[in-house]
Image (cartoon, helix red, strand yellow):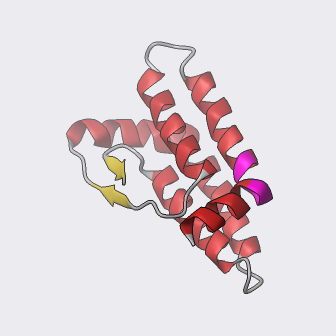
Amino acid sequence: MGCLGNLLWFICGGFLSGLSWLLLGCLWCITIIGIPIGKQCFKFAELSFFPFGKEVSYGGGAGSLLLNIIWLIVTGIPMALESLALGAVLCVTIVGIPFGIQHFKIAKLALLPFGAEIR
């Protein structure tokens, strides 16, 4: 199911979602200070391209808390709202529910990415 789900996801919107994360990561990497945040965007792009079969575990410390606050203000809220809106639209039909759940997973990770690990 994971391979088929990832293929359908990539064709039906995962490409655009991942592309938006790649663009955002490139914009963050323009400055030296933004490189850690840009690296998180690239992690999101990988997850957005192929989310099925991957799990997210959360952890972190004081350093990740500070970066999460900066992330939340600048980038996290708009990208999480985008994923929430797409997930809600996809959950309208029974066929779209697995894709909506993946968008909700990405939205949760988009709020607080630092200290999270994708397995």
Where is residue 70? Give x, y as percent. Answer: 44, 36
Query: Relative to 15, is 39 above or below?
Result: above
Q: How many marks?
A: 0
Give 28 or 55, whichever is nearer the viewer: 55
Identify the image quadrant of residue 81: bottom right
Q: Is residue 34 magenta?
A: no
Image quadrant where one finds the C terminus: bottom left
Please report the residue visible at 56 percent of the width from the left and 24 percent of the height from the top. 28
Look at the magenta stretch and give its main secondary structure. Answer: helix
Vertical placement of 16 versus 25: above or below? below
User: Which residue is at a point 53% across and 50% down the rendered structure image?
Assistant: 47
Q: Is residue 117 left or right of residue 13?
A: left
| Range shown magenta | 11-15
Residue 11, position as x, y percentages in the image: 77, 56
The residue furthest bottom is 94
Q: Which residue occupies the foreground of this view, 28 or 9?
A: 9
Judge whether 57 appears above or below 91 on screen: above
User: Is 37 left, or right, of 86 in this rendering?
Assistant: left
Kindly identify the residue that appears in the image at 68 percent across and 55 percent down.
82
Quarter that holds the N terminus: bottom right
Residue 60, horizontal then vertical, whole percent: 24, 47
The answer to which image quadrant residue 103 occupies is: bottom right
- For image coordinates 70% across by 73% down, the residue present is 88
In the image, residue 86 sits, relative to residue 76, either above or below, namely below
Quarter occupied by residue 26: top right
